[in-house]
Image (cartoon, grey):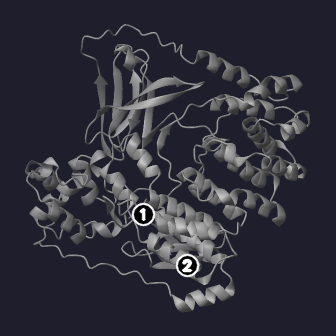
């Protein structure tokens, strides 16, 4: 979270040959790419586990037809109601059931028509539940046939029947008219059908196609299946398409088609790059976020002469949207719907990161002031909060951008503005007196978890140094897991167990390693970076800037540490009131109006 390539948990309709752009890190595709397919519905942050349809339940018809999704993190089961849309579907999310805590794991429809589900995992107590319907609506088996969109689905399936190998001229002839179809899934299926035939059967046809929508699909197919020798012809054909006359979808598709031509067939000559940039430059900046993102991406690749100026202006002109960071925004809206999801997807702070990410590859055309402005913005952005990988991503953007700075620029930048040393805020001290707490004592405190103080819980979160390693409602470190929704995963006993016995269950994501060198030296810490020849180890969980570099050739053994980086006696400096306020603060999900404070 907090990066423009973050993708929420989502439901996809997996058709023949479908692609949804899931890649590691910054390689993820936006769902509007022409060679991808869209999601049926976005769920949001979470940990997807069990999935089942309501077929066979003794529920009202609407719920017999629903798709049930279980989310472990937020303790929520969703019912997704699907509606035919063209040759595919769109979905509407409904919160079917939830509780805190309710770490859902799996679900199934029983022979009695009830919906059964289980909870547990990560050391939490397991249990089996049954959902039945009580009411006046009919629960007789529903007609599950979707009549709406049946004809379009049949068209798509007839095209998918040609997705096997060794298709001939007849398949090309049958599929070609559908490359310009209004339905996205049908266009996608038609393109894949064409791609199964020998390129020689349709290459000239693709280069000569006059319908702009069909031409883009055909040229995408040729970029994917053609030889590098056809690159200039593909680019020439793309150049004939009038960008201004296309809809936003058409413009996004054309920009992706250019990208695929360069990715698949090879880098254009500088002359061709300038020609393409010259065609696209007048449309940047655009009126929509998606177009600005893709124009920026393509124009940076082409080293457009105006892309630096325009992109830095976009970074300067777009407000941050009133939220200090994306994680905080999400924490305040953990059960957000489509409107908030869309707001987050288009959040200006995320667009700025995208612009900075794209600009990192542009080596020439910078003024020194522009370089200063760019790196200053990145250094400020690095200080903001995001997901566990956020800081690493921002460091990588900066490193790759710095590698493209010329030596004279580098010398001037280093002399004019040395990198600031981050300062650690002074934490408050525990009020005490302390006490050696046991799990049984924590469990017994559950009866006192009301009328607590939100502000003192927040203070104690800092005083106990939790904030140094853990983020809560958008604030804190990232050396340990985000605790904003710990109440959705653990009851008081399980939470207390993790505080008293941190070594009992250690997440692989945050586990430290013991690195033993050939000289017998043992270095304990989290491996934060690894190359073919080097390990970088963060040795102080309270200060991620403290790192040790070890040559791999000097490493004798690397084993996971059995000791959690979290201190075992974390609570022992706190008095009962502080412990209660801290527990209430954590269990409240950061809501000062929680019943725990009333």
Question: What whole-number distance in Å separates the C-alpha atoms at marks 2 and 1?
Answer: 39 Å
In the picture provided, is 596 more to the left or to the right than 413? left
Q: Which mark's residue is nearer the viewer, 2 or 1?
A: 1
Q: Which residue appears farthest toward the bottom when viewing the image? A: 415
Q: Where is residue 96 in the image (x, y as percent from the top left)?
A: 32, 29
Q: How many marks overall?
A: 2
- Counting other residues with Cα less than 10 Å from the Cα at mark 2, is it few (<14), some (14-19), or many (20 or more)? few
Earlier in the chain: of badge 2 and badge 1, it is: 1
In the picture provided, is 287 more to the left or to the right than 304? left
Mark linked to residue 549: 2
Circle 1 — which element?
A: loop
In this picture, is 77 found above or below 144?
below
The answer to whether residue 555 is visible is: yes
Mark linked to residue 319: 1
In this picture, is 116 found above or below 387?
above
In this picture, is 597 found above or below 399?
above
- Which of 410 and 493 lies nearest the eye of the viewer? 410
Mark linked to residue 374: none
The answer to whether residue 199 is visible is: no
In the picture provided, is 330 more to the left or to the right than 51? left
């Amino acid at each position: 979270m907090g990066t423009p390539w973050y993708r929420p948990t989502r439901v996809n309709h997996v058709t023949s040959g479908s692609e949804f752009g899931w890649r590691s890190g910054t390689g993820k595709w936006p769902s509007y790419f022409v060679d991808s397919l869209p999601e049926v519905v976005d769920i949001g942050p979470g940990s997807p586990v069990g999935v089942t349809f309501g077929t066979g339940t003794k529920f009202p018809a609407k719920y017999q037809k629903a798709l049930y999704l279980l989310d472990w993190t937020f303790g929520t089961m969703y019912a997704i109601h699907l509606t035919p849309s063209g040759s595919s579907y769109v979905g509407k999310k409904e919160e079917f059931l939830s509780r805190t805590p309710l770490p859902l794991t799996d679900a199934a429809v029983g022979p009695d028509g009830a919906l059964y589900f289980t909870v547990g995992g990560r050391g939490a107590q397991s249990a089996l539940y049954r959902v039945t319907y009580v009411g006046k609506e009919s629960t007789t088996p529903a007609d599950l046939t979707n009549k709406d969109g049946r004809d379009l689905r049949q068209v798509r399936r007839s095209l998918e029947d040609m997705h096997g190998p060794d298709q001939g001229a007849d398949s090309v002839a049958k599929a070609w008219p559908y490359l310009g179809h209004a339905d996205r899934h049908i266009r996608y299926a038609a393109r894949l059908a064409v791609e199964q035939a020998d390129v020689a059967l349709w290459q000239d046809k693709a280069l000569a196609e006059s319908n702009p929508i069909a031409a883009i699909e055909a040229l995408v197919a040729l970029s994917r299946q053609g030889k590098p020798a056809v690159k200039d012809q593909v680019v020439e054909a793309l150049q004939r398409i009038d960008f201004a006359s296309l809809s936003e979808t058409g413009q996004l598709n054309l920009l992706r088609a250019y990208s695929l031509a360069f990715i698949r067939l090879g880098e254009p000559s500088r002359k061709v790059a300038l020609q393409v940039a010259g065609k696209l430059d007048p449309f940047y900046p655009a009126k929509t976020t998606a177009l600005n993102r893709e124009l920026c991406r393509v124009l940076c690749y082409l080293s457009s002469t105006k892309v630096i100026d325009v992109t830095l202006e976009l970074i300067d002109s777009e407000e941050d949207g009133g939220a200090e960071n994306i994680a905080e925004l999400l924490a305040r809206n953990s059960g957000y719907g489509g409107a908030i999801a869309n707001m987050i997807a288009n959040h200006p702070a995320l667009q700025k990161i995208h612009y900075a990410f794209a600009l990192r590859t542009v080596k020439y055309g910078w003024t020194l002031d522009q370089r200063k402005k760019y790196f200053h913005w990145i250094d400020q952005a690095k200080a903001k909060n995001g997901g566990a990988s956020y800081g690493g991503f921002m460091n990588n953007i900066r490193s790759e951008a710095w590698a493209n700075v010329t030596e004279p620029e580098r010398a001037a930048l280093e002399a004019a503005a040395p990198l600031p040393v981050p300062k650690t805020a002074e934490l408050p001290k525990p009020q005490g007196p302390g006490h050696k707490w046991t799990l049984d004592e924590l469990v017994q405190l559950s009866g006192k978890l009301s009328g607590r103080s939100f502000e003192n819980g927040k203070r104690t979160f800092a005083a106990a140094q939790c904030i140094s390693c853990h983020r809560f409602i958008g604030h804190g470190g990232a050396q340990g897991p985000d605790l904003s929704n710990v109440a959705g995963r653990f009851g008081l006993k399980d939470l207390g167990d993790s505080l008293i016995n941190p070594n009992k269950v250690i997440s692989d994501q945050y586990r430290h390693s013991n690195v033993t060198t050939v000289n017998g030296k043992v270095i304990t810490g989290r491996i934060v970076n690894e190359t073919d020849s080097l390990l970088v180890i963060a040795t102080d969980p309270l200060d991620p800037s403290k790192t040790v570099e070890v040559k791999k050739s000097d490493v004798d053994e690397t084993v996971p540490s059995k000791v959690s980086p979290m201190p075992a006696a974390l609570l022992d400096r706190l008095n009962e009131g502080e412990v209660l306020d801290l527990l209430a603060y954590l269990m409240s999900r950061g809501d000062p109006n929680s019943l725990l404070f009333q």
